Image (tube, rainbow, N blue to C red):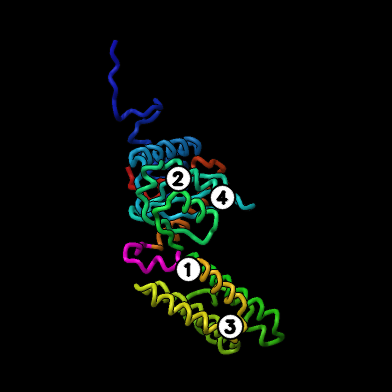
Amino acid sequence: MKRERLDWLAGNPFYTKRFGYYVGRRCRSSSIKAVAQELHLDWKTVKALEQEYMAEQYRRVGVPGPKIIGLDEVSLRKGHTYRVVVSDLVRERPIWFGGGDRSEASLHEFYRWLGTAKCQGIQLAVMDMWQPFIKATRAALPQAAILFDKFHVLRQLGVALDEVRRREYGRLKGKDREYIKGQKYTLLSHWANLDLRGKRMLKKLLKANKRLHTAYLLKEMFGQLWGYRSERWARKFFENWRASLKWQRLEPYQRFAAMIDRHWAGVAAYCQPENKVSLGFVEGLNNKIREIQRRAYGLRDEEYLRLKVLTCMLPAI
């Protein structure tokens, strides 16, 4: 007796592939619980169908051969439990999620998975100034340039600004202190991103505190560094910016400037025409992963999260 194979049948006899793919597509924009309620299914069934759908999505794209990669880590939960996320910045999609932490050994797992031949094709690696990532990348990709992500650098400058704010709050008393209270996120925001009320509060704060005024202006000015096409002019801008710190008593900014000086090659790499990549993708992916984690709150299945991250930028099937 012969048995004919029908492509539209799934491995499970209780549903078709078309229905399984429909459930998977619905889960791209809704939670498992919401889809289960809508379709009158058990949530475990919906989760299983979505995992099959994502596994098929991932299988269809095959093993990547990236030219430019972005490296980052994602926190699974409190307690510094991290996984490494690697993205293809040309195709703008994550290609690897794994490791046991954010160590050098964890990143080496990715390079071993990708293989020596495809590692040799990588021309640029974008990352933050995390030494384990730098060491692993230099060892595995000696031919690749390293570029430090603009958003991570500016986040470090934001940390320095917040330290200045906290020091000023501790130094001042009475009414002068009241201007600073509750203004952390107003100070850390770009002027263009503030609403009318935020701009009024910021003006009042900067008028009342000269040191914070100086620190805020220096923070806003530093973003110009990524606009230069010549490393020589970028370095001149940075030296002038650092010189303006003199006599300002902004110790956190002095430490930030020293950090940039130590890692200058990875910052200046953006001046090279071949390294002009979209640095916003890794930041956008981070926001996407946080959204996925919120939607899957309470779910402790790491394989589900891995597939969810790896397929979040892939086209629907």
Determine the residue located farthest toward the top in the rendered image. 1
Q: Kindly report the distance in space between the C-alpha atoms of the residues bearing marks 4 and 1.
A: 23 Å
Q: Earlier in the sequence, mark 4 or mark 3?
A: 4
Q: Nearer the viewer, mark 1 or mark 2?
A: 1
Identity of the amino acid at label 3?
Answer: Leu
Identity of the amino acid at label 2?
Answer: Tyr
Is residue 201 part of the magenta span, yes or no?
no
Q: Earlier in the sequence, mark 4 or mark 2?
A: 4
Q: Is residue 305 visible?
A: no
C-beta proximity under 8 Å, tags 4 and 2: no
| x 40%, y 55%: residue | 144
C-beta proximity under 8 Å, tags 1 and 2: no
Q: Which residues are magenta?
A: 264-278
Residue identified by numbered label 4: 103
Dot 3 crowding, Cα within 10 Å, few <14, some 14–19, many 20+: many
| x 50%, y 66%: residue | 263
Camera-side residue: 284 or 241?
241
Secondary-structure class at tag 1: helix
156 above or below 114? below
Residue identified by numbered label 1: 264
Identity of the amino acid at label 1?
Answer: Trp
| x 47%, y 58%: residue | 127
**Picture coordinates of residue 49 (x, y %)?**
43, 36
**Picture coordinates of residue 222 (x, y %)?**
47, 76
Secondary-structure class at tag 3: helix
